[in-house]
Amino acid sequence: MKPEQLGPYRIVRPLGRGGMGAVYQGVNVETDESAAIKVLSSTLATEPDFRQRFQVEVETLLKLYHPNIVQLLGYDLDAEVPYYAMEFVDGNSLEEEIQSGRVFQWREVAEMGIQTCRALRHAHDRGVIHRDIKPANLLLTKEGKIKLSDFGIARLFGLTRMTAAGNVLGTVEYMAPEQADARPATPRTDLYSLGGVLYCLLARRPPFRAGSLPEMLEKHRSAQPEPIRRYCADVPAEMELIVSQLLEKDPEKRIANATMVARRLEAMVRALSVTPNTLERQEIERLQRESDAADAEATSAAPIEDLPETRLMTEVPLPSPGRKTPPRAVAELAETAAASAVLVSGQGARPAAPAEEPQGLEKPQPSSGRFVAVAEEDLDRVESAEPEPHPLISLHTWVLAGALLTIGLTAWYLLQAPSADALYARIKAATDDETFKSSLDVQKAIDQFLQRYSDDPRCEQVRRYQREIDLDRLRRKLEREAKGDRSSQELLPIERAYLDAIYESGHDPECGLAKLQALVNLYPREDLSGRVGQCLDLARREVQELRLKVAKINAESQVELKGRLELAEELKRKEPAKAQAIWRAMIELYQEKPWAAEAVQRARSALDAEAAKKETQKQ
C-alpha cells in the first residue's frame, strides 16, 4: 500500500494516542529527517474550541527555541485535520526509565534538574507556564540530554480565553496545591511539579501515594512527603533541602525561580565534586553567593508502586475555586481521567503496539491545507507589551513620601523620653506569659530601659528578658542554617553538635535528649560566655523541654505495653501462639528501653513459663 502522508512527512509508525488525537513518527521525504507529528482527532477537529486550543499550542511553541525544549518544525492549522511536526527525540521518557527499573544516582538527577530548569527559565521568561511537568514529559536523549515536551496545556501569562482559573489541568501525582484548588498557575507552579519529579527520580516513587483522585489532591494541599533519604540514603542533605523547598505548599515559600534552582544544584555539585563524602558548608556558601549575584544580574538584564497515574488533559470547570474540590467536580475529573491519555512528542509516551497500527487509532488523512515550515529564525518571538499610561504621581514618589513620613514619625518617637515605670510596665505586660515572641515585641523598650535606667533595681529582671531574646536569636539563626540560609556565619563545633541533636530529637526524642545531655556534660563550667555560652544555655533549655516530652511519651507507651500484656494473658489459653508472638515482639522492640524493663521482664517470664509448661508435658 502507498504510505500515507501529512504535508512533507511520510508516516512511519504511531507513537501514542489520547483523547485529543495521536502522535506519529514521520520522515520528511525531502530531507529524510524524522519528526514527531501531533494530529488533532478528526472528531474534535470540527469543534472550534479544540481547534483554537490546538492553535494556541502551536503559538506557544513558536515562542520557544532552546536546546532543552523539543523544537517545533512546522504546522498546518488549515488542514481538515490540523497537525504540527516537532523534533523527534530518539530516546525514552524519564517515566519509561523509571518503569524499566533504572536507579538514578543523585548526580544524574541534579544534572537533569539543571537542564530542566534551563528549559523552564526560557519558557517562563517568554510568558509560558508548562503546568504539566512530570517524568512522561521529560525525554532523555541517547546523549543524556533532557528535552521538555508536551506544552499541550501550557498557558501564556495573562491568557484567559482558553485555560482560565477555575479549571483543573495537569497530572495529579505532580500537581501543585494551587492547581488542585483551581487557582491561577504561576512559574512557581512548574517548580513544585519539578520538585515532585526530582523526588520521584531519587526515591523511585512520587511524593504522595493515594487510592483515589480526591485523596491525592488533598495530600498535595496538606500532607508532607516522607524524607527522600529514607529511600535513598546517599542523597546529600543540600539536595533534600532543595527538593523540600520546591514542594512547599505556599508558592511564596518555594525557591523564587528556575534560575535560582539551577544555580543551587550547580553549587552543590561543584562543592561535592571536591569533597564527595562531606558537604563543605563554607564552599556551598561561597558558591551560593556567586550564584545569587549572577542570578540578580541576569534577572535585571523506582517504578511507581501501585499508584494509578491519573492524567487530566481536558478542562473541567469547577463551580468555584476553594480549599476542597467539589464532589461533583471530582466525579467529572475521574470520568475525564478514564477517557484521556497523554500525547508526548517523540518517544515520551509508550506506543500501544510499536510495530503496527493500534486498534481503533485513526489513520491520518492527507492534508488539505498548507504546511508551514518553521525556520529557526522564526522561533522565539516575544511580542512587546503596550506601555502602560504613567500616573500623575509615580509610585517612586509615593514610596519616597512614605519613607520621609516614617522617618519623621520615628524621630518624633525617639525624642520622647518615657519614664522607667512606663517602660517597665510595657515590658512586663508583654512578657508576663514568658514567651519569646512577646519579649521580641518589646526589644526596643528593653534596650531603652537598660540604657536610661541602669541603676533601677528592676534591671536584673529586664536583663533576664534580654537573655531570653539573645537565646531566641541564636535558635532562629541555627534554624536558618539548618534550612540552608547562606547568610549565617560559619558554625562553631558546639553549634553543629546542637543542630545534630535537635535534628535527631525530631525523629527520636530519647536519642535527641541523650545527645543534648551529653553536650551539656561536655562543658561543665558555668562561666562560659559568647556564642559557646549561649548555645550551652540553649541546650540546657532544650534538655528540660525534651525531658517532659520523653516522660509523656514513655508514660503513654507503658500504658500501651500494659494493654498488650493483658491481651496476651487472655490469648494464652485459647491461642497460645499469638500470645507468645506478642511477648517476643515486646522483648524485641523494648528490651533496650529502661522505662520498659518491667514489661519486658513480664514478657520473658511468661515465655519461660510457657516453655517450662511444654517441657513438663513432654515428660
Image (spheres, rainbow, N blue to C red):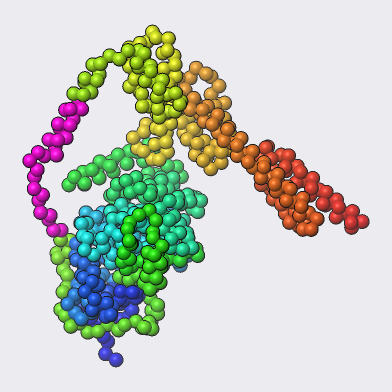
Q: Residue at x 77, y 58 (%)?
A: 575
Q: Is residue 278 above or below residue 424?
A: below
- Does residue 196 appear in this view? no
In the rendered structure, does residue 405 fall within the stretch colored magenta? yes
- Image coordinates for residue 225, horizontal then vertical, percent: 46, 52
Q: Residue at x 39, y 56 (%)?
A: 324
Quadrant position of the N terminus in the picture: bottom left
Q: Residue at x 17, y 31 (%)?
A: 402
- Image coordinates for residue 185, horizontal then vertical, percent: 29, 56
Residue 272 sits in quarter: top left
Residue 403 sits in quarter: top left
- Image coordinates for residue 293, horizontal then vertical, percent: 25, 41
Considering depth in this image, is 40 or 379 the residue closer to the camera? Answer: 40
- Image coordinates for residue 342, horizontal then vertical, percent: 35, 70
Farthest residue, direction right: 619
Farthest residue, direction bottom: 1
Q: Residue at x 77, y 50 (%)?
A: 569
Considering depth in this image, is 255 or 348 the residue closer to the camera? Answer: 255
Left-right relation of 531 to 186: right
Left-right relation of 514 to 229: right
In the rendered structure, does residue 221 fall within the stretch colored magenta? no
Quadrant position of the C terminus in the picture: bottom right
Residue 213 sits in quarter: bottom left
Residues rendered magenta in the picture: 382-407
